Image (spheres, helix red, strand yellow):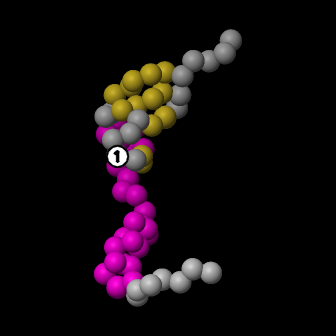
Amino acid sequence: MAHPKRKTSKTRRDKRRTHYKTTAPNLAVCPTTQEYHLPHRAHWHEGKLYYKGKVVMEKETLV
């Protein structure tokens, strides 16, 4: 089994551990539908795709 030749410093160890995020993502509120969604992303609401409060696309229904 391999062993480290030198001790890993606290700074180096902590730098590696900074990539683990423990906080929840921030949520934005759509000005049109008042729905919560991830910021800078489109979201579906009642069959319509909204981005920046405007309808971008409507879901097609199979007839």
Is the stretch drawn in magenta largely helix, strand or loop?
Answer: loop
Q: Is residue 49 above or below residue 20?
A: above
Q: Which part of the image, by quadrant, shows the C terminus?
A: top right
Residue at point 40%, 31% (across, down): 50
Element type where label 1 sits in the image? loop
21 drawn magenta: yes
Q: Indicate the position of residue 8 as horizontal and vertical percent values.
A: 39, 83
Q: Amino acid at mark 1?
A: Pro
Q: Is residue 44 left or right of residue 33?
A: right
Q: Where is residue 62, by image quadrant?
A: top right
Q: Residue furthest top?
A: 63
Residue 25, given in percent of the width and then of the height, sits at: 40, 58
Q: Quadrant of the N terminus?
A: bottom right
Residue furthest to the right: 63
From what the image shows, is residue 27 above or below residue 6? above
Q: Give the number of marks.
A: 1
The answer to whether residue 13 is above or below residue 40 is below
Q: Is residue 60 above or below residue 24?
A: above
First to last magenta residue range: 8-35
Residue 57 can be seen in this image: yes
Q: Residue at x 31, y 34 (%)?
A: 52
Residue named by callout 1: 39
Residue 23 in sight from this viewpoint: no
Relative to 53, 57 lies left or right: right
Mark 1, Cα crowd under 10 Å, few <14 / some 14-19 / many 20+, is some
- Asked if residue 61 lies in the magenta stretch, the reply is no
Residue at the image point whose x is 41% and y is 73% from the top: 17
Q: Residue 58, image x and y in percent? A: 49, 21
